[in-house]
Image (tube, helix red, strand yellow):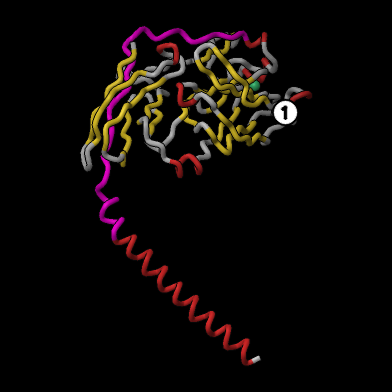
Amino acid sequence: MEAVANISQVKEVWVMKIGTFTVVAIAAVAFLAAPMTSWAGGTVEGKVSFAGKVPAPKEFLFSKFPNPKFCVKNKNKDAKGEKRFLNEVEVGKDGGLKNAVVAVMGINDEKFQADFKGQDITSELCEFLPYTGVVTANQSSFRVMNKDADPDDPKSVKGVLHNPHSFEVKGTANTTIFNIALPEKDKGLDKPIKLRKAADGSVFKLICDQHEFMQFWALPVTSPHYAVVGEDGKFSIKDVPAGKYKVVAWHPAINKGVPIEQELEVKDGASAAAKFDFK
Ligand SMILES: [Cu+2]
C-alpha cells in the first residue's frame, strides 16, 4: 500500500511539473503574440457598384408550380399575385450592388476551413434566405431548414414540400452535390458539401426542385476575409495579414457570374481601398 502511495505522490509532482511548464509556455506565447495581433494586418474597404441598367426580375407564374396559394404570400410578386418575381439584381439608391460577395483571395486559412459551418439557409414563404453567401470547398455542414406549412391545404398542413437541390456550377456545367426533399415544417437537412473545382472558379448553387424561383448562391472562400454587401454596396474586411492580394467581387447574376478582380497591397495598420464597378 505504501509503495502505491509513493508512486502516486511521484506522479502528482510530475503532473505539477508538467502543469507548471505548460502554464509558463502558454504565458510566454501569449506575451509574444498579444502585442503582435493588436496591430498586425490591415483593412480592405470599399464599395461594389452597379452602373448598368438593372435587369427586370425573373418572372414565374405561381400557377405553374406547387403550392401556388401558399407561395403567393411571398412579397416578391406582381400586383395581381399571378407572378412570382426573383429579384436577382438589386441596386441601392447610391448604386450599391446588394448581395455581391467580396473576398480576399490566396489566403489558405486551414483552421477557418476546418471550423467553417456557414449559415442556416431557411425556406420561408417559398424563398431561400439569404440569396447569397459563402461556402468552403470542403464544408462539413451545410444546413437548410423548412419553415413553411400551409394550414389551408390538407396536403401541406405538416409542411410545404421543398426540395433543396445543390450544385457545383462552373460555366455551363452543373454537378449535383445533394438533392433532398424537406416535406415537414421545422425540419431540415444537414449535409457536408464538396466543391471539387473551387480553385478553378466554381460556385455553389441551391435551388428548390419544387419551386425554381427559390435560389441561394455562394462563392467558395478559403479564409474569413470576405464580405457579403448590403444595398449600400460597402464593405470593410478587417485584420487581413499584410501582403499583396487579388481581391474579387462576385454576383451570381451579373457579368455571367464571373467575378471582377483587383490587385492591392495590404499594409499593417493601414486601409487599402478597393472599388468594384459592374456594368
Ligand atoms: Cu420549394
Q: Disc 1 marks which amino acid? A: Pro
- Quadrant containing ligand 1 reads top right
Q: Secondary structure at mark 1?
A: loop
Quick check: is 49 in the magenta stretch?
yes
Q: Is residue 32 found left or right of 176 in the rendered image?
A: left
For disc 1, the neighbor class at 10 Å (few under 14, some 14 to 19, many from 20) is some
Residue under circle 1? 183
Q: Quadrant of the C terminus?
A: top left
Q: Quadrant of residue 66?
A: top right
The magenta segment: 32-61
- 263 horizontally vs 76: left or right: left
> For residue 177, which quarter of the picture?
top right
Q: Return the x and y of residue 92 as percentages of the image width and height.
A: 35, 20
Q: Nearer the viewer, residue 195 or 11?
A: 11
Question: Between residues 208 and 152, which one lies in front from this camera angle?
Answer: 208
Q: Quadrant of the N terminus?
A: bottom right
Residue 133 in picture, x, y percent from top left: 47, 29
